[in-house]
Amino acid sequence: QVQLVESGGGLVQAGGSLRLSCAASGRTFSSYTMGWFRQAPGKESEFVAAITWSDGSTYYADSVKDRFTASRANAKNTVYLQMNSLKPEDTAVYFCAFAYGGDYLRETRGYNYWGQGTQVTVSS
């Protein structure tokens, strides 16, 4: 089992920034992937970003590339999502997810465990 605890959501004006954190505990291993997804009301879950733990490779959705940055703190088993230049369309519940492998990292089916989600609201 892996437990994921997220923090850092909130309300921000358009153009502002937020940083989300996701701490993993439990049966983690040296080679895994952590991802971020979001879901807005009435919409399907959407891939946002992912980072591989072994070498820190990052992957982004086109909609957030150059605005969002995923990073990790190895000693803390924590991944971060720095979100800059936020737009109203970024409003959603953001979930972090854990995968033992790296297949299908842009799809929800690629992940084994999920956090509880944190609300991000961007006002115009």
Image: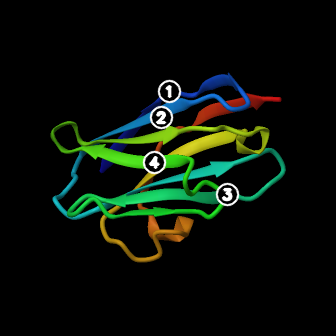
At mark 1, the secondary structure is: loop
Q: Distance between the residues labelled 1 and 3?
A: 19 Å
Name the residue tied to disc 2: 20
Residue 45 numbered mark, or none:
3
Type of amino acid under label 2:
Leu
Q: Position of residue 2 (x, y in %)?
A: 31, 48
Crowding around mark 1 (Cα neighbors within 10 Å: few <14, some 14 to 19, many 20+) is some
Which amino acid type corresponds to the residue marked 4 in the rendered image? Thr
Q: Is mark 4 on a helix, strand or loop?
A: strand
Q: Position of residue 21 (x, y in %)?
A: 41, 34
Q: What's the CA distance linking mark 1 and mark 4? A: 14 Å
Report the Cα–Cα distance between label 4 and label 2: 10 Å
Q: In which quarter of the image is the C terminus?
A: top right
Badge 3 marks a residue whose secondary structure is loop
Asked where in the image residue 77 lies, by quadrant, the reply is top left
Q: In this view, does 30 lie above or below 89?
A: below
Q: 41 left or right of 3? A: right
Contact, mark 1 vs mark 3 (Cβ under 8 Å): no
Disc on res. 69: 4
Horizontally, residue 72 falls left or right of residue 76, namely right
Look at the numbered disc 2 and give the secondary structure of its residue: strand
Q: Which comes sooner in the sequence, label 3 or label 2?
A: 2
Residue designated by label 1: 8
Looking at the picture, which amino acid does disc 3 mark?
A: Ser
Q: Which of marks 1 and 2 is nearer the N terminus?
A: 1
For the point 57% across and 47% down, which residue is it?
67
Question: Which one is in front, 78 or 57?
Answer: 57
Nearer the observer, 121 or 45: 121
